[in-house]
Image: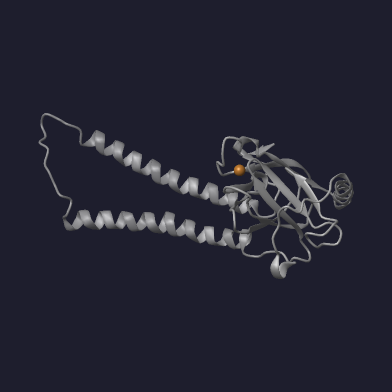
Amino acid sequence: MQQWGFPVDISTTGYRVDRLFWLALWLTGIAFALVVGALTYFLICYRARSDRRAYYTHGDSHGAISLTGGLALLVFLLIDVNLAYHDHAAWQAVWGAPPSAKEALRVEIMPEQFAWNIRYAGPDGVFRTADDVTTINQLHVPINRPVIVQLSSKDVIHSFFLPNLRIKMDAVPGMVTSLYFQAKTSGTYDIACAEHCGFGHYRMRGFLVVESREAFTTWMVGQSKARPPDSSWGWNWGGAA
Ligand SMILES: [Cu+2]
């Protein structure tokens, strides 16, 4: 399902990203139409004619400089400043208010060429203990609960991308980055790698399953029985743990 050509938005903040996209498209689209319109007008109006001689100007008259400066200022204020203002507001909403580590579900993701290694802390809520749950390419989250994801990378730079949540973060070797989101619609959605990371880049398609709290718990219990935790990677959550 799509909205205006976008993947359906299932997040609490994604509409802000979409609005920014449309605002940028409209502003630059209008500017583009005006520029092309003016260009066409001048091309026709001042085309070569036998009764008119061309003349040359450096464009350094007072009027020409004022017009150029005025137009530049107008573009700067109407497009750049306008976008920067709205961008700041959206940024604050999407990245500026992380949920507390207590209310949120915490997930560690360690991508490698070419898969997403995903780890949950398990019932005790502490990472790198015997009840950790690890999966590959399968990220299950409960609906309407904030999720904090911490990322690093085993090999090259990947980019963890959830198109339906309008959120994306680089996964960099030797560094821990993070993002958070809250999904409000259940279903199965794509996880993509948005950084071309090698020949198997296309294989880094994972699945995000948004489900009820009960279904999530049932899944988690099943996973913990299905496979032993993978302790070959990890990091400290610092104060958040
Ligand atoms: Cu990748």
* Residue at 17% over, 54% down: 60
Image x and y of residue 53, in percent: 10, 36
Q: Nearer the viewer, residue 166 or 223?
A: 223
Question: Where ligand 1 lies, by quadrant?
Answer: top right
User: Where's residue 92, x and y in %?
Assistant: 59, 63
Instruction: Specify the quadrant that holds the N terminus.
Output: top right
In this view of the protein, can residue 27 be seen by the observer?
A: yes
**Residue at the image point whose x is 16% and y is 55% from the top:** 61
Residue 92, above or below 151: below
Residues 8 and 145: in front is 145
Residue visible at 61% across and 54% down in the picture:
16
Query: What is the quadrant of the C terminus in the image?
Result: bottom right
Apparent side of residue 224 relative to residue 97 in the rendered image (left or right): right
Q: Taking the image as drawn, is residue 139 in sight? A: no
How are the residues colored? one colour
Q: Nearer the viewer, residue 179 or 125?
A: 125
**In the displayed image of the protein, which residue is found farthest to the top?**
50
